[in-house]
Amino acid sequence: METLTYKFTEDSFLYQQLYQFIKDDILTGRLSHDEKLPSKRKLSQHLNLSQTTIEIAYQQLQDEGFIYSKPKVGYFVETIETLNKAPENTISLISPKEETARPTFKIEDSHQTSFPYHLFRKYAKEAFESEMSELLDRGHPQGEDALREQIRRYLYHSRGVSCTNEQIIVGSSTEQLFTLVTRLLPGAVYQIEDPGYPLIRKVLHYEQKSYIPIEVDEEGIIVKSLHKKANVVHVTPSHQFPTGAVLSAKRRTELLKWTLKKDRYIIEDDYDSEFRYKGRPLKALQGLDSHQKVIYMSTFSKSIFPSIRVAYLVLPEPLMLKYHELAHKPNITVPRHIQYIIAQFMQSGEFERNINRTRKIYKKKLDIVVETLKPFEDYLTISGEQAGMHCVLEFKQPIAKPDGINISLISDYAEKNHKKYRQQLILGYGGIEDCSIKHEIQHLMNKIIQKKET
């Protein structure tokens, strides 16, 4: 028998470490069946541990059936046939605070330091009080009544959306709710913006639905180019994703007129409408629709925080009838406690106050971005900055993404390979601290200019 040699640390009790070392050796076959273990005295001397430590470890191994003892002879390895050692972790576990990567310019990043965490803690504590035990049961498949009421009130006052609580369905993501829409419109041919939100294409591919890309310009989706075979169009009219274009009033009217033919619908994805910096907030298409032809969807990912994973859908009344007739409706995918917390957050008025605070934070960031880019006006123009947390930098010729910087081109979101999309860089500034924006943009621009000149 080989002498058992192990390296101990100060992370846990010595007897626990010794127990785990011997157990691992048995499970991996290093110590085989009926092999004799060192006596407590010899192992104590070899490892410089007390005999008590050895005895406790041996006793635990014996109690769990890994070793057996023979009186006056010693301890031996038991037959272990059904147990396997779990594979060791090969991924370094680094907490977010320990990460030292450069800030990124990705669209998804957002600023959270001003979020009222204390209120969320308060509402979370309330949600788990014994008096709220009903939240442990299954809830309504469309979402909590209280949350849907708050969503209805908020949408009416902020976006002009007109609906009842019964028309609102809460889900865990835009993708999940869009998948539900495809089930309600099984024979539809979809028209989607190009460039556009990639997860919409992903859902349509997964659900095996036909779709036709349609180009966008500085006024948003080109309505006159809608294909005659398409009967459902997915749009982001308030702030086109990812170009940032706002759908003009003329095209809004044209799009609503397009739906007047039978079985035509608009899916209005209002993903970041809360953050508009120029003029009054635009009224949602749903609020302008008098024929029940607009399906409205949005999410709390921007207005609260990305990991909240709560979205909502407003269905026209004809589609609500189809929803209730659906054979296999999805169950609610958002925990009732989370729904309770959001409902309280909205009811208190803090939700809208938080949006107002955050809007000012992003407007300040945008002002720094625009000011920092002024010296580079000979190289680029800025667009799409009216709303959201990103803008588009259009260069005079195609560029390559600089090495070592997390940033996207419009072409990353487009199906058609237009030259102009390779000239347009998407600059997301939501997740960068104010004090770093100027330095990070200058670093970005210097790398792009150097790359073009070499």
Image: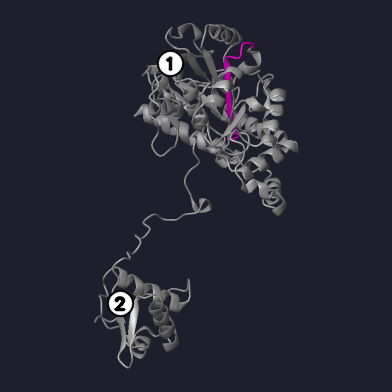
Nearest the eye: 57 or 112: 57
Label 1 SS: loop
Left or right for 270, reference 209:
right
* Residue mark closest to the camera, 2 vs 1: 2
- Give the distance between the C-alpha atoms of the residues marked 2 and 1, in whole angstroms: 65 Å
Image: 446 above or below 396? below
Instruction: Write down the region rendered in magenta.
Output: 290-302
Three-letter amino acid code of the residue under disc 2: Glu
Image: 64 above or below 89? below
Query: Magenta includes 308?
Result: no
Identify the disc placed on residue 189: 1
Nearest the eye: 409 or 352: 352
Rendered residue at 65%/37% (across/down): 144
**Other-residue count near label 2 (Cα within 10 Å), few / some / many at <14 / 14–19 / ≥20:** many
Image: 152 above or below 404? above
- For the C terminus, give its image quadrant: top left
Rendered residue at 34%/70% (across/down): 24
Residue 368: percent from left, percent from top: 60, 31
Precedes in sequence: disc 2 or disc 1: 2
Residue 347: percent from left, percent from top: 74, 36
Tag count: 2
Three-letter amino acid code of the residue under disc 1: Val
Residue 58 visible to an observer of this rendering: yes
Identify the disc placed on residue 415: none
Rendered residue at 44%/14% (across/down): 214
Query: Magenta includes 299?
Result: yes
Residue 379 visible to an observer of this rendering: no
Disc 2 designates what residue? 78
Nearest the eye: 303 or 142: 142
